[in-house]
Every structure is written in C-alpha cells, then in structure tokens.
Amino acid sequence: MLIRIDKDKCTGCEACIASCPYDAIIIKDGKAEINELCQMCKACLSVCPEGAISEVSEDSDQKEKGQGRGVWVFAEQRDGKTAVVSFELLGAGRRLASELNTELSAVLFGCTESEADELIKWGADKVYHCNDEIIKVFNDEPYAKLLSDLIQEHKPDIVLAGATPIGRSFIPRVAARLKTGLTADCTSLDIDKETGNLLQTRPAFGGNIMATILCPFTRPQMATVRPRVMKRGEYDEKRKGAIININADNIKSRTNVIETVKEASETALNLQEASIIVAGGRGVGGPKGFEILFELAEALGASIAASRAAVDEGWIPYRHQVGQTGKTVGPKLYIACGISGAVQHLVGMQSSDIIIAINKNPEAPIFNTANFGIVGDLFELIPLLTKKIKEAKGL
C-alpha cells in the first residue's frame, strides 16, 4: 500500500502539510509531493479539500499476501534433542492454525525421525525433517539457506521460531533472504479477526510499552518468541501426521563447526528449566540479603534468580537475571522477594504457574501480578518460611 497524490487535482493549498506528523509532504513546483519519510499514518487522507490524496494498493501487495497458507514452527534442537521452546511454539502455533483454519507444520534439522514423531504428538500436522551431515550441528549459513529454500517452495503464511541464541542468530538471515518482515522477542501472538494478519506483541522502549506489530502485505509473517512465555499444547500419544524427509544435497557452507564448548554456568544454572525459583530484587538490600534467599532455595530445591536492579548493584551475577534484558522463565512456583514489579521484570516471569510476592510496600506493582501476596519484612518472613519447610521435610 502507498499514499498517492493526484497532481491534476492538487491545487497546492498546503492544507495537507500541517496534518503530517512526519514532515513527509512537501510542495514542489506548486504541487504537493509525498517523500520517503511517509509512515502510512493516513492523517492526510481526510484533509485535502480537493480529494487529491488517496491510499492505493500495489499489485505486488495482493500477490504476496495471497501466496501464504499454513503456520510453520522451526523446531530447535540441542545435542540431538528437541528444545523445550519448540513444544511451546507448537502450542501457540496450534492455536493460530485453528483460528485460521489451516495446518500446522514443524521444521526439524539435525535430529532422528523419532524426534520428528514427537513433534506430531505435540500438535504438528506435518514435519519437514532433515538429518543430513551438514546440518547436524547448528551453523548459520546452511540453516538459513535450507529453511529459506523450504519456505520459498511451500509458502507458509506464518513462520515462528524461538528467541534463543540460535533463533536470534539465523532467523533474521532467513527474513532478509525472503525480503519479509520479522518481529523479534514476541511475548504474545494473536490473529486479527478482520484481516487474518498475525498480531505480534513485544516490549518496546525498554519495556515501558507493549507494541503490537503487523506485517500486512509481505509473506511469510515471521516472529521469534521468547522461551517460557507460551504454554505447551496437548500431548497426544496416538496422534498421527506426515513426516516429510528432505535432503540438503544442494546446501553448501563456507565454514565448519569444529567444536561446541558449554560454558560452566550453562550446566550449573539453567533457570529456564527450573520448576521452582526464588528471586530477589533491590529490596533484599545487598549480598547478605541473598544469603537468606539461598537458604530458602536450598530447602525448596529451587534455583535463585534476580531482578536487573540487584544485578546492576553487583549483588549477584548476571546469569541469574530474569526480565526483558535477562532470561524468561516459566516455573511452577516463582517466589518474588523484595521485587517491586517493574514491567521489564514481569515480562520475564509472568507466565509462571504460581507467583508469590513478598514485599513490605502494599502498593508494589508486583501484587497486581502475583497469585498470592505477603506484605511484610522479608528478613523476618523468609527465615520463618525456611524453618517451616525444613521442619516439614525433616531436615
């Protein structure tokens, strides 16, 4: 779509110039013109007294929009095992596919066929599966080439991937190859009931607002989704689907992955896999405050997390940070201690099954999100809670 000015109708009255918030309309040779600053806000359409400004569609817009059908999920794998984020995306993809009355497909590189069958049981109707040697270990170049080739051949309407180090690394390359849009780090996905477009919601301006982004014309509509913000779909042991084996004979790579080395913290601390998390914020007051949280976590068999404020103060390492600029988690139980509840932190933990907030400020925003709230001094409450848990466990 574009905004067009009919030069034959335009009288150069300049009424449209004041209406444009982007300074995208200029007068040249006595006629109004639209320049490259136009953001398609359409504010100018109703102000022209001569009706010289109109919105027109291009043939290529309608052609591309009509090409897409189906929802695809890129199923990420690590060490030959499908990553948990893939099952979360299948849950979201199943819902979107049902609303669009279309099929849900998964794309799996570098795993055995038994892993492909698991994706069907988690909701996929089809799985495009490739286990050729060149893509067994993740490498940007062959992954981007193979996935973009598949998309060009089958033309899905929507393509989803995890906003993980792997997804963030190569999915933008795929979008660039396809000349389509990509919305990164989405926390919500819906379908516009009127147009059928994908509504892609993500934090913007440092998490201070939530922006909903559309890709109305080019296809596919692509988005990466933060791990732990979507719920898994239903697992059906008896579910059947099609596994389509593909080969990567025409895929070349200028680089080879010699070795993958895991950072020590990756194995020692994986907040995204934790079922119970005890988190501390600025209210813990310092490193000594975290000591009592570690005692509670040990009693519960939980992992320790922190807000950005606590990490910025140097009280705890960054690898514990939960929030927009940290990790996104979705445990069964999240205990927030001394955390005010800024939106940047909520984005990273609001999908937890049960949230318990402990804060001495009864007006703290965290209580609006928590399932259970305790107003009190955490330095009194946490030791008592730890003691009761140890007594109940016979420790």
Image (cartoon, rainbow, N blue to C red):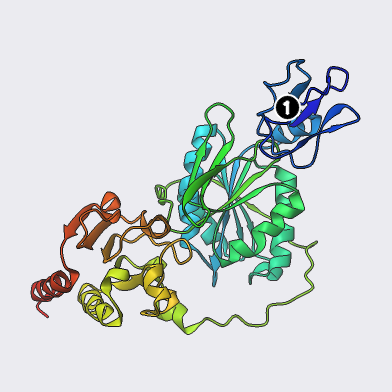
Residue 326 percent coordinates (x, y):
46, 67
* 119 up-or-down from 42: above or below: below
Label 1 SS: loop
Could one spot residue 77 in this view of the protein? yes
Could one spot residue 280 in this view of the protein? no
Amino acid type at circle 1 is Cys
- Front residue of 251/306: it is 306
* 10 up-or-down from 375: above or below: above
Residue 10 percent coordinates (x, y):
83, 20
Instruction: Specify the quadrant of the image occupied by residue 16.
Output: top right
53 left or right of 318? right
- Front residue of 243/363: it is 363
205 left or right of 327? right
Which residue is identified by label 1? 16
Name the outermost residue toward the right.
29
118 left or right of 284? right
Tell me the residue at 54%/59% (across/down): 163
Quarter holding the C terminus?
bottom left
Residue 183 percent coordinates (x, y):
60, 50
- Front residue of 2/53: it is 53
363 left or right of 47? left
Q: Residues within 10 Å of mark 1 (few under 14, many from 20)?
A: many
Tell me the residue at 44%/75% (across/down): 319
Tell me the residue at 80%/61% (across/down): 250
In this rendering, the count of numbered labels is 1
Instruction: Specify the quadrant of the image occupied by residue 287.
Output: bottom left
Quarter holding the N terminus?
top right
Tell me the residue at 52%/36% (across/down): 191
Residue 75 percent coordinates (x, y):
56, 57
